Image (cartoon, grey):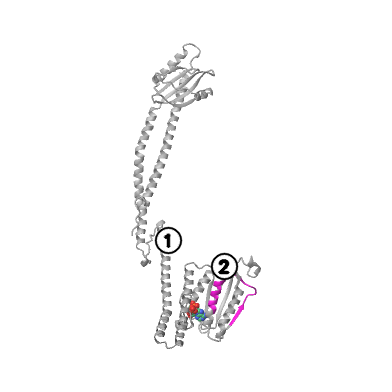
């Protein structure tokens, strides 16, 4: 079943949406910033123009004593004439120290520039004051207010104003153009974004199509990996690696179930056959008892197999938990030695324990599992050694960093071509012979899982007809003082 994403939930749509939103925010904020910046520059230009005009007009106004009658009117006339001649587009307004207008340009009619407190404070400090002022008719003026002095005496206040209509119109025009063009631009760029997102996601679509072709039946299929290194190549490589692991565990499971059913089939067939025969032909109680005894053997064998398989399944699925504790290897081997004697005595096999260490060796490990693994070597050694043979159990140290446990026998040995396989599940060197001895072929694979879980390793030396030696190397915990039991409790 195809699970195509809906248009609105698609990455392509979301990418484009985010792109458009980010673009809109960036463009809007940059436009607001540049608009304000432009307005500040234009205002600065107007202010310096007003200041220059004010200086010129102030000079014109200082050509006589203010107290003399008629001087003020004459000066007003001169200023107006000057402005008429130069046509700078500025209007003036002159006020006496009481704030009353004494000279006003004709072009502003009844309009009066304001003279507020802040302006007065600025004037009292000898400074010039700039402000933007809106008339009742909606006209905007930039007004400069400056003091006029006669020998350090404030005689007049000069206000020069410039109509901001031209600047406002230019700024408004710019704003309108932006209001129209910006969305269009965002739309156009979002279209480009949609196209690019589509192109960028195309390889992903191809990968999805390829993945769809892979099923449990063809786990050997792999995604094509382009020689160009990019994120998608990495994805394909990672996916292929995962697929590899999946295929491996899949085939392991197949092998496992195949092996298990194959191994259980033989004892089941024997059980069935023997039961059928005795049901049909058994003459007396004794014969039936023999059949039941034989059946019990097969059942025990199946029990061993299922137990072993369960153990291996746990270790392969990572559920194999070690219950670590600190204990003495010397004690463990001593215990195993006693155990092995009860097994070897009936076969008249001599068991020897050799402690090739001059002190006790402590280890941090799972005692129960380690006991099980080492016992497996010992039972194998006894199993595959004929009567009158010898089994040696030894403990030694490798540079104080590794413990070495040897289990050697004088048994039948293992031919060299079988050695690499004896740790495989259900592997038996000689099927017919082993069946009589009673092995399941699972023992050594379980042992290997246990020793590997302890970060140890196993070495096998064997000469057919002479005997075998299994050596287990176990790392020692450097934090433990292996020589002193006192340190164990630490
Ligand atoms: P089994 O239950 O058959 O003993 P193992 O996994 O323990 O299974 O051993 C695998 C095979 O390795 C055995 O079937 C046997 O042929 C061989 N083997 C193991 N230990 C010895 C030994 N000490 N001497 C000879 N052969 C051995």
- Cβ of disc 2 within 8 Å of ligand 1? no
Q: Give the residue displayed 49% in from the left and 25% down from the top.
A: 129
Quadrant including the N terminus = bottom left
Q: Which residues are magenta?
A: 351-378
Q: Is residue 468 visible?
A: no
Residue placed most toward the observer, 23 or 39: 23
Q: Give the residue displayed 35% in from the left and 42% down from the top.
A: 185
Residue 356 percent coordinates (x, y) = 62, 76
Q: Disc 2 or 1, which lies upstream in sequence?
A: 1
Q: Is residue 459 visible?
A: yes
Quadrant including the C terminus = bottom right
Residue 381 percent coordinates (x, y) = 53, 80
Q: Which residue position holds label 1? A: 238
Would you place residue 453 above or below residue 11 in this image? below
Mark-to-mark CA distance, 2 and 1 = 35 Å
Say which quarter of the image contains residue 172: top left
Q: Give the residue displayed 40% in from the left and 87% down from the top.
A: 281
Query: Is residue 372 part of the magenta span, yes or no?
Result: yes
Looking at the rendered structure, the secondary structure element under dot 2 is: strand
- Comparing labels 2 and 1, the label whose residue is closer to the camera: 2
Q: Residue furthest front?
A: 285
- Cβ of disc 1 within 8 Å of ligand 1? no
Would you place residue 110 above or below residue 235 in this image? above
Left/right placement of residue 11 relative to residue 446 reads left
Would you place residue 57 above or below residue 378 in this image? above
Residue placed most toward the observer, 107 or 290: 290
Q: Which residue position holds label 2? A: 324
Residue placed most toward the observer, 387 or 218: 387
Looking at the rendered structure, the secondary structure element under dot 1 is: helix
Q: For mark 2, does the 10 Å Cα neighbourhood hold few (<14), some (14 to 19), or many (20 or more) residues?
A: some
- Disc ID at residue 471: none
Q: Give the residue displayed 63% in from the left and 67% down from the top.
A: 488
């Amino acid at each position: 079943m195809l699970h195509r994403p809906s248009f609105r939930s698609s990455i392509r749509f979301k990418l484009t949406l985010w792109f458009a939103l980010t673009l809109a925010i960036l463009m809007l904020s940059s436009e607001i910033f540049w608009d304000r910046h432009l307005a500040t520059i234009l205002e600065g230009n107007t202010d310096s123009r007003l200041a220059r005009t004010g200086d010129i007009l102030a000079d014109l106004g200082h050509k006589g004593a203010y107290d003399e009658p008629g001087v003020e009117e004459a000066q007003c006339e001169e200023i107006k004439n000057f402005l008429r001649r130069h046509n700078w587009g500025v209007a003036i307004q002159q006020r006496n120290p009481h704030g009353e207008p004494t000279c006003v340009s004709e072009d502003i009619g009844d309009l009066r520039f304001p003279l507020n407190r802040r302006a007065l404070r600025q004037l009292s400090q000898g400074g010039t004051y700039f402000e933007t002022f809106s008339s009742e008719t909606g006209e905007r003026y930039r007004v400069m207010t400056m003091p006029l002095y006669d020998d350090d005496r404030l005689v007049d206040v000069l206000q020069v104003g410039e109509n901001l209509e031209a600047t406002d119109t230019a700024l408004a025009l710019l704003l309108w153009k932006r209001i129209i063009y910006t969305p269009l631009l965002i739309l156009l760029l979002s279209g480009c974004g949609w196209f690019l997102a589509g192109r960028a996601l195309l390889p992903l679509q191809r990968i999805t199509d390829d993945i769809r072709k892979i099923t449990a039946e063809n786990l050997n299929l792999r995604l094509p990996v382009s020689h160009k290194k990019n994120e998608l190549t990495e994805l394909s490589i990672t996916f292929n690696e995962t697929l590899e692991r999946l295929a491996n565990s899949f085939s392991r499971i197949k092998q496992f179930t195949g092996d298990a059913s194959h191994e259980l089939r033989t004892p089941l067939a024997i059980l069935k056959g023997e039961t059928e025969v005795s049901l049909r032909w058994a003459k007396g109680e004794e014969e039936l008892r023999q059949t039941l005894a034989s059946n019990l053997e097969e059942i025990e064998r199946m029990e061993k197999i299922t137990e072993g398989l369960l153990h291996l399944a746990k270790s392969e699925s990572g559920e194999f938990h070690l219950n670590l504790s600190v204990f003495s290897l010397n004690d463990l081997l001593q215990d195993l030695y006693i155990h092995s004697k009860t097994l070897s005595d009936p076969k008249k096999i001599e068991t020897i324990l050799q402690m090739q260490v001059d002190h006790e060796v402590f280890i941090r490990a799972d005692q129960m599992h380690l006991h099980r693994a080492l016992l497996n070597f010992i039972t194998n050694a006894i199993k595959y050694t004929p009567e009158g043979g010898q089994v040696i159990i030894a403990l030694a140290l490798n540079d104080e960093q590794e413990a070495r446990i040897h289990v050697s026998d004088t048994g039948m040995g293992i031919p060299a071509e079988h050695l690499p396989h004896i740790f495989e599940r259900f592997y038996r060197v000689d099927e017919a012979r082993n069946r009589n001895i009673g092995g399941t072929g699972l023992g050594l694979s379980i042992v290997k899982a246990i020793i590997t879980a302890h970060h140890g390793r196993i070495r096998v030396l064997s000469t057919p007809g002479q005997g075998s030696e299994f050596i287990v190397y176990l790392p020692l915990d450097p934090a433990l003082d292996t020589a002193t039991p006192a340190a164990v409790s630490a």
